[in-house]
Image: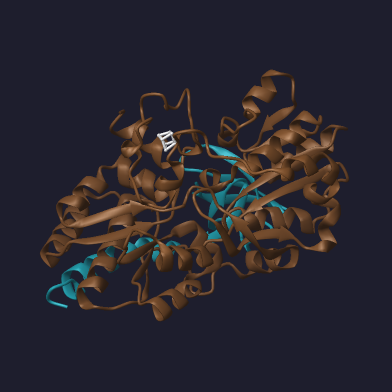
Amino acid sequence: MAIPGKVIEITGDKAKIQYGEGVVNSANISLVEVRVGDYVLVHAGFAIQVLSEAEAMETIALWNEMLNTGGFPDA
Amino acid sequence: MFELRDRAMAEKIISKIRDMDQQIRIMHVCGTHQDTLVKHGLIDMLTQVGVEVRQGPGCPVCVTTPQEIEETLALARAGKTIAIFGDMLKVPSESGSLLKEKGKGADVRIVYGINEAIELAEKIENDVVFIAVGFETTAPATASILLGKPPKNFSVLCCHRTIPEALRILVTSGKVEIQGLLEPGHVSVITGSKMYDFLSKDYKIPQAIAGFEPLDVLMGVYLLARQIKNGEAKVENAYTRAVSPEGNLKAQAAMANVFEPCDVKWRGFPVLPGTGLKLRPEYAKWDARKKYSDILAPVYTREYDEPPGCKCGDVLRGEIEPQDCPLFGKVCNPSNPVGPCMVSFEGGCAIEYKYRRKS
Ligand code: SF4
């Protein structure tokens, strides 16, 4: 299970990641290019991807549009 | 920013699927998808609007074979320190389980990832063997650690498997006819969405990549239903906030450096060509199968059967639902699991037991 968290501090290959409001844990960031403030997906102690905040914000809007305009059967 | 649980939106997606007025069957290959589907009651909602969702071999612990469990047990009995994910501990095999070995004094440590296994190896003198299970989501972590030249007393029993080729086999030889594939979000984070193109091209199978919030999964199903209705077969991405066409190139490079593909058996399946990962010869000194070939040799002298009566193979091929297994909820339950699907939190039987029908 991978969970999203925010990078709050970077030291070499390790970063402190904050999940939700509180919990902070260390994760290995050798598989991604990240900066403090980025959101990452963390799986088994490794950040595996940087999440696109813009995409996340737009997801619902995009889907709504798709359902309203591109949705079957009026596609 | 990641709370995708809006009820009105869910109902809208469901009603759009209902409007398509078709009876379809799709498959996913991800334990976390199954969790979301069952936990939030989506499976029943979808059945009511004509979509049957089957689970495939998407639980990494479950597809691990009896032989791999026996390898782990042999190493534990030989006095090696075993570092392993918690849900592998109870997986029963013919000659016992790690939990039982631990009870008898074997040094078995639960870790959340390979980084903790390394920290352990740095702290203790004894040989530490990390049991590396998982798909593309965890294999890059193993690769990254090995690239960093871990300590001498550390090694890896590599049980990693990869998804795309296995899907080809599911699509072409499965007994269950499936009309669409819901692709696993976090595997796709690494592989990228392009990795699946061949399936739609060669086998005309619709595909959608989905994340793990309820709306992610519903949207993935909606995209599949729409493709099926329109007679299309392509790869659509409902998880763009994490999955790009190319995937995580750094992770792919690490994997390519450390692993080479190999043929491997999956529980419930025969040997699936090219779906396993083994360490390249340069990493032989961290390869538990090379390092401890003498300890492991006896394991390979025979075949190991599935636990008697257990239908995990059928569950993993999507041919039956957990409650169709005669042992489900009776002889087999989370405190007395007969097969791995009742052990792992990503296992179909454990998920079914936790949220729904208990027998
Ligand atoms: S219910 Fe138990 S015995 Fe039956 S398939 Fe699932 S894990 Fe195996």
Q: Position of residue B269 (x, y in %)?
A: 51, 54
Q: Chain B appears in which tint? A: brown
Is residue A54 at all visible to an observer of this figure? no
Q: Is residue B275 left or right of residue B224?
A: right
Chain corresponding to cyan in the figure: A
Q: Position of residue B218 (x, y in %)?
A: 28, 56
Q: Is residue B1 left or right of residue B21?
A: right
Q: Nearer the viewer, residue B351 or B25?
A: B25
In the rendered view, would you say B147 is above or below A3?
Answer: below
Locate residue B252: give its quadrant.
Answer: bottom right
The quarter of the picture where the C terminus of chain B appears is top left
The quadrant of the rendered image in which ligand 1 is seen is top left
Is residue A27 at all visible to an observer of this figure? yes
Query: Please, which residue is most extreme toward the top here?
Result: B104
Locate residue B222: give its quadrant.
Answer: bottom left
- Write the residue at 56% across / 63% down: B190
In the rendered view, would you say B236 is above or below B355?
Answer: below
- Write the residue at 34% across / 46% down: B320
- Write the residue at 47% across / 65% down: B169
Q: How many marks?
A: 0
Q: Nearer the viewer, residue B2 or B175?
A: B175
Query: Please, which residue is most extreme toward the front here?
Result: B302
Q: Is residue B43 left or right of residue A28?
A: left
Q: Position of residue B315 (x, y in %)?
A: 40, 46
- Write the residue at 77% across / 55% down: B146
Locate residue B38: give its quadrant.
Answer: top left
* Rendered image coloring scheme: by chain
